[in-house]
Amino acid sequence: MSFKSRGLFKPDSEEPLTLSRTKVDLFVQCPRCFYLDRRLGVSRPSLPGFSLNNAVDALLKKEFDLHRAAGSSHPLMKIYGIDAVPYRHPDLNEWRNSLSGGIGYFDKETNLFIRGGVDDVWVNKDGELHVVDYKSTAKNGKVSIEGEYQKGYKRQVEIYQWLFLQNGFKVSPIAYFVYCNGRTDREAFDGKLEFSVEVIPYAGTTSWIPGVLKEIKSCLLKEDPPPPAPTCEYCSYQKATKEIAID
């Protein structure tokens, strides 16, 4: 558990509060965890970094950037019948940098600045942008975005779509997940991990975001933490430890 003072919401401050798209998603998952994080500086326990996933992301970006420079479609686009090419824009590297930049938008009504780092952007023949997110896993069978955990994936690309729309871009509701699945059906490792790659379309909706931002601001203005989400494992664990007498 970590305690932070920087970047916290202060009710008496007129300065905008910056929220990453992960913090917006944290609120959707559990308002109490969000309040503890952004109002009181108490974060959820951290998880180890996904180094292999990051390596796959980096290599995919290099691969798609080759086609971006050439103005050509990636073979996966042709396989899946996607009439688009990787989008060329001078701010692309900034959009990709979730730590220091990303694409952002200041919402005047709530005084919140929302930002997020996108993996990739494609553009179709009508000039519409497609938000693209890279995912990697290792499981038997086909990958899918229909599980409970993948609801967060969907919210992720919808927030990106909303950010691009607020910045004046023409955005297609169709986002794409480039999903890499590590194969375990090989006879040996031989120093390399092979993946099967699928491109999964998803029709996103951004209509929920303005309402959630208002709820976030209302939550932050409260003097006491809101109740936990019924499905929050972190809050359930905290409650259980309080109920157990420990010598």
Image: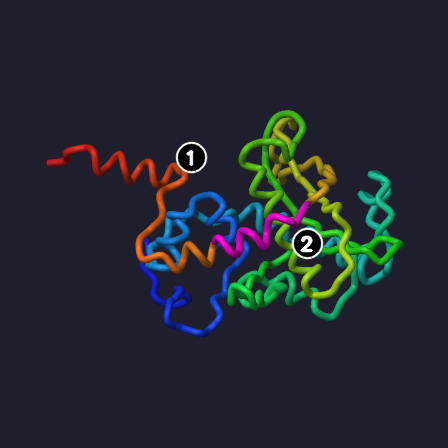
> In front here: 55 or 239?
239
> Residue at left 71%, top 41%?
202
2 or 1: tag closer to the N-terminus: 2
Q: Secondary structure at mark 2?
A: helix
Is residue 31 one of those drawn in magenta?
no
Q: Main secondary structure of the magenta part?
A: helix
> Residue at left 61%, top 26%?
140
Which quarter of the figure is the C terminus placed in? top left
Name the kind of residue labelled 1 in the image: Thr
- Measuring from the top left, give residue 123's x and y in whole percent: 81, 55
Q: Which residues are magenta?
A: 205-215
Q: Secondary structure at mark 1?
A: loop
The answer for how far apart the CA atoms under marks 2 and 1 are is: 27 Å
70 relative to 194 in the view: left or right: right
70 relative to 8 in the view: left or right: right
Q: Which mark is residue 231?
A: 1
Name the kind of residue labelled 2 in the image: Gln
Quadrant in the rendering for residue 69: bottom right
The residue beneath circle 2 is 161
> In front here: 225 or 169?
225
98 relative to 219 in the view: left or right: right
Query: Which colour scheme appears in the figure?
Result: rainbow
> Residue at left 69%, top 44%?
204
> Residue at left 79%, top 64%?
88
- Measuring from the top left, give residue 154's x and y in whole percent: 62, 43
- Measuring from the top left, give residue 174's x and y in whole percent: 75, 45
Asked if residue 70 is positioned above or below residue 33 in the image, the reply reads below
- Measuring from the top left, give residue 22's x and y in whole percent: 51, 53
Q: Which mark is residue 160?
A: none
Quadrant in the rendering for residue 210: bottom right
